[in-house]
Amino acid sequence: GAGVSQSPSNKVTEKGKDVELRCDPISGHTALYWYRQSLGQGLEFLIYFQGNSAPDKSGLPSDRFSAERTGGSVSTLTIQRTQQEDSAVYLCASSLGGASAGLASGETQYFGPGTRLLVL
Amino acid sequence: KNQVEQSPQSLIILEGKNCTLQCNYTVSPFSNLRWYKQDTGRGPVSLTIMTFSENTKSNGRYTATLDADTKQSSLHITASQLSDSASYICVVSASGGGFKTIFGAGTRLFVKA
């Protein structure tokens, strides 16, 4: 596609409900990243997928958070039993990726518009 | 501890004026430093990326500098426009395995007519 897309653009849910956020990366990009941005805060890394390698989940804040990437393309971030502190903008990004690529190699990362999650 | 600190937190300038945003980091071992522009309600967009050997890089009216010795970077915006109103985020990546990229909290720039 032309860019990274995310859905829904906005999500309001009740505390305790589960939510699923979707990310469609740029076609051909093998690296996919999820971040969380709370109001007035910097981006917080959540999880990183690179090709068929095991994802780097080191940023997930609790076991209520999980993500999967099917077929090496679309990714879904799931938050179970949502809490009010989960309210934030969830950003997805993708990059070309590859065995010797990644942000440390200077690869350009393209961000989606984000999903604004509000937990009441 | 790997950290990226940006200053000021926010800045208001008049259209046409220049401004400079600061970024200090302690990320190690250093690999690269990026500046992003994030418009309200949008995802960040890359402006510049610099490696250890680069000390300046320009993208139109945006010029980034890097002093790897003092671990400081700046983003200079020349002849500001209303459309420059956005958050500017400094991001530093470390080399090595795993995800080692740290995002600063950003500087919120307001350009007034």
Image: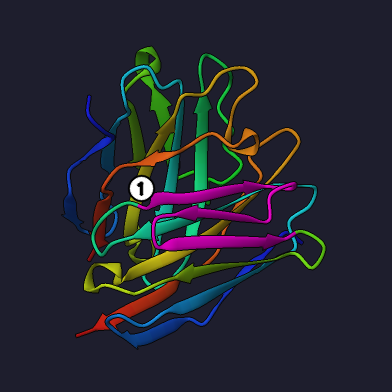
Q: Nearer the viewer, residue A35 or B6?
A: B6
Q: Residue at x 51, y 38 (%)?
A: A47
**Looking at the image, residue A52 lies above or below residue A78:** above
Q: Position of residue B69 (x, y in %)?
A: 82, 62
Q: Residue at x 62, y 62 (%)?
A: B65
Colour scheme of the picture: rainbow
The reply to whether residue A62 is visible in this rendering is no
| Kind of residue at disc 1 | Leu
Element class at badge 1 = strand
Horizontal and vertical percent position of residue B22: 58, 74
For this view, does A76 lie left or right of residue B98?
left
Quadrant of the rendered structure where residue B103 is? bottom right
Residue at image x 68%, y 49%? B54
Q: Is residue B69 above or below residue B102?
A: below
Q: Residue A93 occupies which quadrant of the picture? A: top left
Residue beneath the point at 51% across and 82% down: B8
In which quadrant is the N terminus of chain A drawn? top left
Q: Is residue B38 visible?
A: yes
Q: Nearer the viewer, residue B18 or A87?
A: B18
Quickly name the residue at label 1: A91
Question: Which chain's residue wears label 1?
Answer: A
Q: Give the camera-side residue of B3 and B50.
A: B50
- Depth check: give the residue in front, A13 or A26: A26
Where in the figure is residue B72, as x and y percent of width and height? 69, 67
Within-10-Å neighbours for mark 1: few <14, some 14–19, many 20+? many
Q: Position of residue B45 (x, y in %)?
A: 37, 50
- Overall secondary structure of the magenta stretch? strand
Q: Is residue B55 magenta?
A: yes
Q: How many marks?
A: 1
B101 on left or right of A3: right
Specify the segment rendered in magenta. B44-67
Quadrant where the image shows the C terminus of chain A:
bottom left
